[in-house]
Image: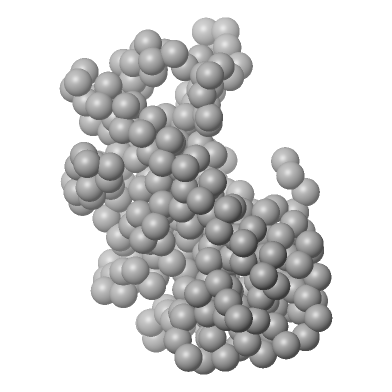
Amino acid sequence: MTPVVPISTARPEHALILAAAAPATDAAGRARLALLLQGPIDWTHVVETTDRHAVTALVLRRLADAATQLLPPELVEASEVYIARQRDTNQRLVAELVRIVRALSQQGIAVMPFKGPVLAELAYGDVALRQFRDLDFLVHEADVDRALAVVEALGYIVASPLSPVQEGAFRRYAGQYIFWRADGDAPIEPHWAFAPRSLAVDLDYAGLWQRAVPVRLAGIELRCLAPADLIAVLCIHGSKEEWTRLQWICDIAQTLQSFPDIDWAVVLDRARRHGHLRMVLIGLALARSFLGSQIPPAIGGVLASD
C-alpha cells in the first residue's frame, strides 16, 4: 500500500488542498483560497500530497478556476497538461468498461458499474476530475461463474489462482475478484458484495438492484446505484479502506453536492437495519469536518448524540 501523507491544517499546503478539494466554489470559498495563496506555498509538497491522496486533478482544476492569477505560471501550464493526460487515460478506461458491460449484457448478465468513471460522471460532472485505476462492477451472486467466464474470454486473468478449497473460502469471505490483462491499463474488479464478511454488513442487494437508476455514459445506458444507496456504499468503502485517502472523503462531499434531495430518513433507516450506520455517520462527519459539506439537521442530531 502507498504510504499515506496525513492531512492536517497545521501546514498551509494542507489547508490549501482541503480548501481546493471542497465542492463549494462560492465567493467565500474563492476568498479563502486567495488568502491561503498569499503566503509561501511548497508546491512540490502540494503535488506529492494530492498525488498520494488521488485528488491532484481535482485540486489543480479548482485552483485554476478560482485563482489562476495567483498561481505560478508554470503550475498553470503543468496543470493543463496533467488534467489532459488524466482525461485521456480515463476515457480509455471508460471505453474498456463499456466493452465489458456490453459483453456481459450480451450473455444476459445484469451488471452495475460503481465508483470509477460512473462516479466521476455522476458526482464530479467530469470524467477527468476523479482519478481511478480499476473498474468496479456488481453482478448478481448467482451470475458470478458466468461473469468470470466472460471477462476471461475478454483476455483477463485472475491475479492469484486458487485451489478449489481456497476458492470456496475466498468467495464466502471476499465478495470480489481482481482480474488483470497483460496489455490493459487497469485491473477490473467484479463484485457480488460491497464488503468482506469481516465488516458484518448485511446489505439488501435485491433492493439495490430494484432501486438502480439509468445513467448514460459514453453513448450507452448503464444501470447505477440510486443516490441514497451510492452514499451508503461510498461510506462502506471508505470504512473498509480506513479512510486513508482524501479522495474517498471527496467522493462523499461531491455526491452530497450533486444530490441534495437524498431522503436521509431512508438512508438512516437502512443503515440501522443493515449494520452500517456508524460507517455512514463517519463518512458524513469527515465530509463536514474536512471539506465543509452541509449535512441535514437530522444527521447532525444523530452525530451529536453518538
Q: Position of residue 95 (x, y in %)?
A: 36, 34
Residue at x-position 47% and y-position 48%: 87
Quarter containing the C terminus: bottom right
Q: Is residue 305 above or below residue 214?
A: below
Residue 15 on image: x %, y %: 69, 78
Give the left or right position of residue 108, taking residue 89 as reference.
left
Which residue is located at x 23 percent, y 49 percent? 215
Count of number-bearing discs: 0
Figure check: 36 above or below 43: below
Q: Is residue 181 visible?
A: yes
- Rendering quarter of residue 243: bottom right
The residue sitting at 67% across, 90% down in the picture is 35
Q: Where is the N terminus found, in terms of image quarters?
A: top right
Identify whether 85 is placed above or below 31. above
Query: Can residue 202 be spotted in the picture?
Result: no
Which residue is at the front of the view, 224 or 184? 184
Residue at 32% across, 27% down: 99
Q: Quadrant of residue 246?
A: bottom right
Left or right of 164 on screen, residue 221 = left
